[in-house]
Image (cartoon, rainbow, N blue to C red):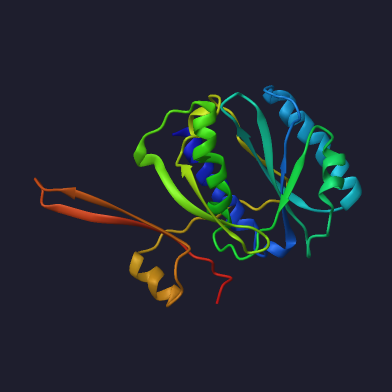
């Protein structure tokens, strides 16, 4: 439950602070060895940020740490620049990181960026679960389609939530820079929200029904995310 709540907070931080994906870079930092030391993980990232800022100036960041079944760690970073993000060759980022390979991925045409990125931290590829011996049920398997920078669609299977049990107890799975704004929550009646958003479609929707037949009570809680920047 603690990891799930952390992922929800992380999702809200991302959606609050990313208004234009053109100003962002999403970079994954990996280790060439099976690095399992969580203290070293954050020390290495802190030193990387110092070197990265020396080369590319002012930016904010949100970083999340992802474990693998064998205990290895890697980092998923969102760098948020004041304007359009500069072009940085992946080899240059890897050189600044200095501990293994890096991967830079485009974030074009994504409405709910927070949900898109946090899914990587909770779910696992079906093939990875099989290779690493992660147990799961058939109900946890979901088919999705990935779209790369060339708009090529690749179908794949994932196992929902398979990675959640891999995080150590009380582990701080994400960190943010000082300039990152905290999310602000407001509570309204569903009818008020629909009136405000008009015909705009939600980027995420979930409904939970509450029923007590003995007391003749029923209600529904609706969760919806909207991209207010989209017309």
Q: Position of residue 76 (x, y in %)?
A: 67, 43
Residue 29 position (above or below residue 67): below
Q: Using residue 172 as the reference point, say whether residue 78 is left or right of it.
A: right
Q: Quarter-wise, where is residue 151 in the image? A: bottom right
In the image, 23: left or right of 125?
right
Which residue is at the far top? 37
Q: Residue at x 84, y 52 (%)?
A: 89
Q: Image point 72% across, 29% down: which residue?
A: 41
Q: Is residue 55 left or right of residue 66?
A: right
Query: Going 49% across and 26% down the picture, which residue do you hit?
Result: 133
Where residue 83 sits in the image (x, y, percent)? 78, 64
Q: Does residue 222 lie above or below 66 as drawn?
A: below
Residue at (54, 35) in percent of width and height: 128
Q: Is residue 38 above or below residue 225?
A: above
Query: From what the image shows, is residue 34 above or below residue 45?
Result: above
- Pick the residue in front: 147 or 6: 147
Q: Quadrant of residue 135?
A: top left
Image coordinates for residue 231, horizontal then vertical, percent: 55, 77
């Amino acid at each position: 439950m603690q990891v799930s709540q952390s992922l929800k907070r992380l999702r809200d931080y991302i959606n609050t602070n990313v208004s234009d994906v053109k100003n962002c870079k999403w970079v994954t930092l990996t280790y060439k060895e099976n690095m399992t030391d969580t203290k070293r993980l954050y020390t290495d990232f802190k030193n990387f940020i110092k070197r990265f800022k020396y080369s590319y100036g002012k930016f904010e960041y949100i970083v999340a740490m992802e474990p693998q079944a064998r205990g290895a760690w890697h980092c998923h970073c969102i760098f948020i620049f004041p304007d359009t993000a500069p072009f940085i060759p992946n080899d240059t980022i890897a050189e600044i990181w200095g501990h293994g390979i890096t991967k830079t991925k485009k974030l074009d045409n994504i409405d709910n960026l927070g949900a898109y990125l946090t899914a990587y931290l909770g779910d696992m590829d079906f093939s990875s679960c099989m290779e690493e011996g992660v147990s799961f049920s058939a109900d946890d398997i979901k088919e999705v389609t990935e779209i790369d920078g060339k708009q090529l669609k690749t179908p794949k299977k994932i196992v929902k939530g398979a990675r959640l049990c891999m995080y150590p107890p009380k582990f701080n799975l994400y960190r943010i820079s000082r300039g990152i704004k905290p999310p602000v929550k407001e509570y309204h009646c569903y009818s008020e929200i629909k009136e405000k958003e008009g015909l705009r479609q939600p980027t995420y929707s979930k409904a939970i029904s509450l029923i007590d037949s003995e007391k003749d009570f029923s209600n529904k809680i609706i969760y919806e995310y909207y991209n207010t920047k989209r017309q």
